[in-house]
Amino acid sequence: MFKIAVLVSGGGTDLQSVIDAVENKELNVKIEMVIGSRDNIYALERAKKHGIETFVISRKEYGEKASDKILELTKGKVDLIVLAGFLAILDGDILKEFDNKIINIHPSLIPSFCGAGMYGLKVHEAVIKSGVKFSGCTVHFVNSEVDGGAILLQEVVPVYFEDDAETLQKRILEKEHLILPEAIRLISEGKVEFVNGKAKIS
């Protein structure tokens, strides 16, 4: 059975979409663990409600060693690490150990509105300020460059003149909840390969 660890920092709606896909038999994977970047986030409650083991690895407690601690928990136990609204940056050995085995969901169409400091509502605020007519979300592989890994899936949504960051976020979240489980399915079924640094879906 293909096993995943899901890393979270907030309410966990993206996590919930994965849990639902597993329970509805759309995904033939096991969520082995959920790791939070801080205590008292609702995502951890969601995991516990479904009998999934949870851990908290905070920068406050572990500092520079946070990524190493996550590696310690996941090495040899999971096939894929899924960042689902995880706001800490992974670095060090975990990126080598899980090369092309870590995915993240980002709330814009990479390479636009991404990189250091671009997360959560800040992304949607920047989108609205720019006046672009379309935004969306991206599932990409994680490497040492923030939001710089190979793009796996993207979904587009319109940006309306009347939108604020919250209304746009809501529209994009609906798409996130579709493409994150789909990305996990494609990887778990061995349908993703890398050609010239790009992810190809077979």
Image (spheres, rainbow, N blue to C red):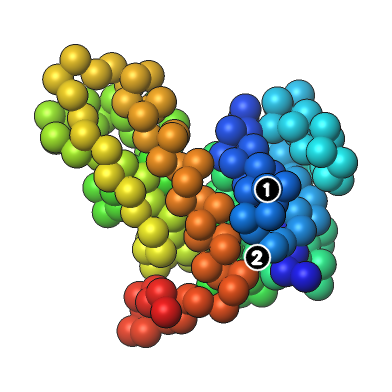
Q: Which residue is labeled 2 in the image?
A: 80
Residue type at the position of mark 1: Asn
**Residue drawn at the location 12% of the way across and 29% of the way down:** 131
Most foreground residue, 143 or 29: 29
Q: Position of residue 168 (x, y in %)?
A: 32, 26
Q: Earlier in the sequence, mark 2 or mark 1?
A: 1
Residue 57 visible, this orientation: no
Assess disc 1: are there few (<14), some (14-19) or many (≥20) residues with their C-alpha within 10 Å of its C-alpha: few
Q: Secondary structure at mark 2?
A: strand
Of tags 2 and 1, which is closer to the observer?
A: 1
Left or right of 111? Residue 187 is right
- Quadrant of image for the N terminus: bottom right
Q: Nearer the viewer, residue 135 or 97?
A: 135
- The residue shown at (47%, 46%) is 178
Q: Residue at x 79, y 51 (%)?
A: 33
* For residue 10, side relative to residue 132 (left or right): right
